[in-house]
Amino acid sequence: MSKSYNIAVIPGDGTGPEVVEEGVKVLKTVSSKYGVEFKLKYYGFGGEHYKKTGEILPDSAIEELKDFDAIYLGAIGHPDIEPGLLERGIVLKARFALDQYINLRPVKLLPGVESPLKDKTPADIDYVVVRENTEGFYAGAGGNFKTDTPDEISVQTAINTRKGVERCLRYAFKLAARRNKKVTLAGKTNVMTYAFGLWAKVFNEIGEKDYPEIERDYGHVDAICMWMIKNPEWFDVIVTENMFGDIISDIGAITQGGLGVAAGGNINPEGVSMFESIGGSAPKYTGRNVINPIASICSVAMMIDTLGQEEMGKAIETAVIQTTSKLKSLSAGKMGYSTSEVGDLVAEAIRNV
């Protein structure tokens, strides 16, 4: 094989191992067809590992992960463990430690998949949300004062640096240049005047100086939410800060058919990126072979594409489109096929692409 990549695999909790198994099945199939090798190393971090060892994601593991070409993540979240503990300790820790400063969320309605938006087709829903991934309210700046008294104060501060804002915006412009040449900044300049004053200033500076061919648009985030429902065809690349991006990307996900087909990437363009499905660990479906693996398979396509193997990524996407058209539903237990059978269908379609 002419090219080789090292991939860290973290199956995680709940149905994570099941969907990762199908993603790996598809990865091995496309690897064999195109002659590109993917060397996989599995890590057992997640709820069961924490229950046995008290360890979440040690610093030593972070150092190991820096040596991989990418990370393939299943799902994190265990019903026996305090909500948020594992998510913060694994997903957020990796994002910050590996400086994965872009959260990339494609919003694309596949042929044969039903959208809850009336009369919208795949031609109408095909855009990308670029979310700043390491700053904003999620940076953890703040604290409590006079706790458990009538005068208790809670402060949470959003951090927006010129460096963080600029590199996120440049990523969005660069992405738009490869797509339909339009970038929309989602903000709140009328209220968050300091934070989005910076975002708007840098947005226009970069656009005017370096990307004059790219159409620039701005919308308050509440209006963006409305237009994502009413006129999603208006968008190509939407870029925004961390919390707003977290919210609007899930609005996008439901319009493309739900979390069962929504994949995401935590991207460091100069380092190690991590790819995952968005739907969570779904513990009530664990071990039943009924969960939809399409989102996890799509995250494999994102990973391959980000590594520079665009043709292979496109082959997976084509195979997914052929497969989703055969499913009765995208919902767990209602697909008409088991989890493993859906993976088999995608793998077989790749062989025939």
Image (spheres, rainbow, N blue to C red):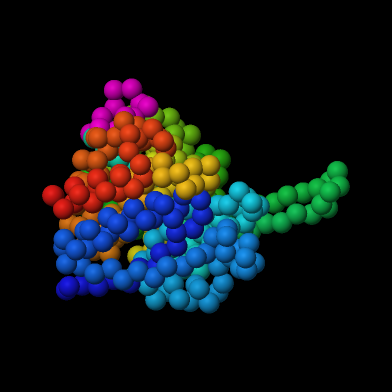
Could you say which quadrant of the image residue 273 lies in? bottom left
**Is 282 within the magenta?**
no
**Is 117 within the magenta?**
yes
Q: Which of 311 and 280 is in front in this view?
A: 280
State whether residue 272 is above or below residue 317: below
Q: Residue furthest right?
A: 149
Q: What's the magenta region?
A: 112-123
Percent x, y of residue 252 = 39, 38
Q: Nearer the viewer, residue 175 or 7?
A: 7
Residue at the image position 27 percent from the left and 59 percent from the top: 27
Residue at the image position 55 percent from the left and 52 percent from the top: 77
| Residue 97 relative to residue 25: left or right | right
Is any part of residue 122 visible from this angle? no
Residue at the image position 44 percent from the left and 72 percent from the top: 65
Q: Which residue lies furthest to the top in this view?
A: 118
Percent x, y of residue 213 = 22, 50
Q: Nearer the viewer, residue 351 or 249?
A: 351
State whether residue 327 is above or below residue 93: above
Q: Residue furthest front?
A: 288
Q: Quadrant of the N terminus?
A: bottom left
Instruction: Report how many numbered discs are placed on residues in the image.
Output: 0
State whether residue 66 is above or below residue 14: below
**Secondary structure that dominates the magenta span:** loop
Percent x, y of residue 311 = 17, 57
| Residue 229 relative to residue 25: left or right | right
Residue at the image position 57 percent from the left and 60 percent from the top: 48
Percent x, y of residue 81 = 64, 53
Is any part of residue 72 visible from this angle? yes
